[in-house]
Amino acid sequence: MIQYKDLFYSFHCNEIPGFEDIGKAARALSEIPAGFDRTELQRKTGVDRHRHMRASLDVLPDKKQAMTLEAKGHLNKALPRIEPKAQNTNHQPDEEWSFRPGHIAFNPSYGRLNDLRTLLNNYFDFNCLQAGDFLYPPHGFRLWHTNKFDLESWFIFFVDVDKPKSSFFKFIDPVTNELITHWDEPGTANIFRISSDNNNLLWHCIGTNDSHRWSQGFSIPDNWKEKML
Ligand SMILES: [Fe+2]
C-alpha cells in the first residue's frame, strides 16, 4: 500500500482480504466501448485546445482560474434542473457514454456499476454512492479541480490501466502546497477525502500518456480504515 499522510492511499485490490472479488468486478469494466473514436475526443475539444489543456497538468494550477472553471461546470450541471431550456451538459438518456474534455464518462443510468456497487455496499455495510465512471484514452486528462461542490466524503476510485506507470493521479498537499504524483498500476484502488472547506481542498488532476485508464468512483464511510487497514 502507498500512503501519503492521511490524504491519499493506494493499494492493489488483491492486498486487502475480502477485496479480491471487488477488484475483479472493477477490472471487468475495463473495456473500450464500441463506437468510441479517440481522435473524435480531441477534435470535439479542438486539437490545439486539447493539447494545451493536457499540458496544464504539468504545472501547479492557477487556482483562481481553475476554481472559476469548476464553479461554471457545476452550474452548467445544475442548471437544466431549474431551467429546462439550458444546454444539458449531463448525459442524454439515449447515450451510454458521452464526451468530456480529455475523457469519456459512462452514463450511470445504464447500470454499468451495479454489481460493483452491490459488492462494495456489502463489504462496507454502507450505501456507497456512485461518483463517476470514466475512460481516459492515451493523452487523456481531467483538469485540475477540487470537487468542492460535490459530496464531502471519503471516496474510493478503482483504477485500471493497460500499461503500468503511464498515467497518473496528481494532487496537492493542502498544508505544504507540494505537488505529489501517483503513477497508476493495473487493478488498484485510490482512496482520498474530498472537502469543501477552502483551507482543506484537495486539488487533483488525472492524465494518461500512452495508455488507457479506467476509473470508477464511490463514496465510502468515514470508518473505512477499520475494515481495510
Ligand atoms: Fe475529482
Image (cartoon, rainbow, N blue to C red):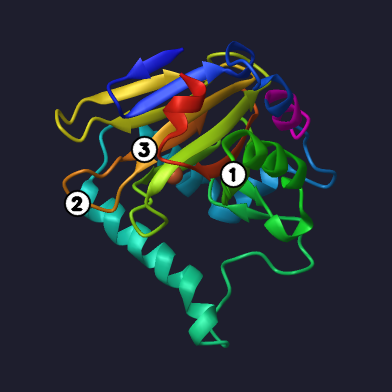
Q: Mark 3 CB in 8 Å range of ligand 1?
A: yes
In the image, residue 67 lies in the stretch drawn in magenta? no
Residue in view at x 78 percent, y 34 percent: 31
Q: Residue at image x 77%, y 42%?
A: 115
* The magenta segment: 23-29
Q: Residue at x 34, y 47 (%)?
A: 146
Which of pointers 1 and 3 indicates the residue nearer the eye? 3
**SS for callout 3:** strand
Residue under label 1, please give it. 103
SS class of the residue under badge 2?
A: loop
Quarter of the image with the C terminus is top left
Task: Indicate which disc residue 198 carries.
Answer: 2
Question: What amino acid does circle 1 point to?
Answer: His
For mark 3, what is the residue?
A: 204
Specify few, some or many for label 3: CA neighbours under 10 Å numbering under 14, 14-19, or 20 or more: many
Relative vertical location of residue 122 with respect to residue 104 in this rendering, above or below: above
> How far separated are the C-alphas under marks 2 and 3?
14 Å
Q: Relative to residue 136, is residue 6 drawn left or right?
A: left
